[in-house]
Image (cartoon, coloured by chain):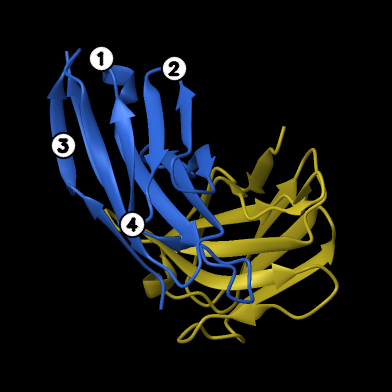
């Protein structure tokens, strides 16, 4: 259980174009999903929290207009990198929170396999 | 502000040589401590959740323990396939569902 998928796994795009990354929870409904960025040999950097049916909450320093997040359903969140530039090249990982375990609120996050973005 | 410190940054073990990874944390009120395993080029894989001091959980060669200040991930008789980066994260329940991650311990198990 608690499987999260991401698509695509790898994408190469030209500078100035936009790229959309999908994150799906396959066997549970996720009211909250998260988007992370990871640089080589570094830990995860939270970019934003995506809440189903409402606007995403972005971390300080993350450009809202550049990294568009949409969480239109309980199983799908998308991250669109607009007008991509080489400095946006990175490993992007999403995660989803399983809302509850029995009656208790659950804080466990399950991660997707990641998307390697290369902007040329 | 929640803080998580993992040590050592890197650890090399011979196959079969047991050891422990440390995760020290400072939170206002711990709601959960989480261990993940991350292989290169992949997303983190969930391992354990610990909720209160004294709690222990096991999975194959891994055992996670929790005190009021730190958590240990004990690796018994490791195999080369245990090589990965192990991440520790905490949640303090401070109004959001965000986790605070440590920088990880890169474990290499040499045959």
Q: Nearer the viewer, residue A53 or B9?
A: B9
Q: Earlier in the sequence, mark 1 or mark 3?
A: 3
Disc 2 target residue: B60
Give residue A69's position: percent from left, percent from top. 69, 73
Check if mark 1's residue and mark 3's residue have beta carbons within 8 Å: no
Q: Which mark is residue A1?
A: none
Disc 4 target residue: B69
Disc 1 target residue: B77
| Mark 1 belongs to chain | B
Is residue B63 placed above or below B46 in the rendered structure? above
Rendered yellow, the chain in question is A
- Kindly indicate whether the residues beneath marks 2 and 3 are on one polypeptide chain: yes
Give residue B23's position: percent from left, percent from top. 31, 50
Q: Earlier in the sequence, mark 3 or mark 4?
A: 3
Identify the residue at image location x=79%, y=61%.
A31
Q: CA distance from mark 1 to mark 3?
A: 14 Å
Mark 1, residues whose alpha carbon is within 10 Å: few (<14), some, or many (≥20)? some
Identify the residue at image location x=56%, y=45%.
A9
Disc 3 target residue: B11
Check if mark 2's residue and mark 4's residue have beta carbons within 8 Å: no
Q: Mark yes or no: residue A69 visible.
A: yes
| Mark 2 belongs to chain | B
């Amino acid at each position: 259980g608690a499987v999260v998928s991401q698509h695509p796994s790898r994408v190469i795009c030209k500078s100035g174009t936009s790229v959309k990354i999908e994150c799906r929870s396959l066997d549970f409904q996720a009211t909250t999903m998260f988007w992370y960025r990871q640089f080589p040999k570094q830990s995860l950097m939270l970019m934003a929290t995506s809440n189903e049916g409402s606007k995403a909450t972005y971390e300080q320093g993350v450009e809202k207009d550049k990294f568009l997040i949409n969480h239109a359903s309980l199983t799908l969140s998308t991250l669109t990198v607009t007008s991509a530039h080489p400095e946006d090249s990175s490993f992007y990982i999403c995660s989803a929170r399983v809302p509850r375990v029995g009656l208790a609120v659950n804080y466990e996050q399950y991660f997707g396999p990641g998307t390697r973005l290369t902007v040329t | 502000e929640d803080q998580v410190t993992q040590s050592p940054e890197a650890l090399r073990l011979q196959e079969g040589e047991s050891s422990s990874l440390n995760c020290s944390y400072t939170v206002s009120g711990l709601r959960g401590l989480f261990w993940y395993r991350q292989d290169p080029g992949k997303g983190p894989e969930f391992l354990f959740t610990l909720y209160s001091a004294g709690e222990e959980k096991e999975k194959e060669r891994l055992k996670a323990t929790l005190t009021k200040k730190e958590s240990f991930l004990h690796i018994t008789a490791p195999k080369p396939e245990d090589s990965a980066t192990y991440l520790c994260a905490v949640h303090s329940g401070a109004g959001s569902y965000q986790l605070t991650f440590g920088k990880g311990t890169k474990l290499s198990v040499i045959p």
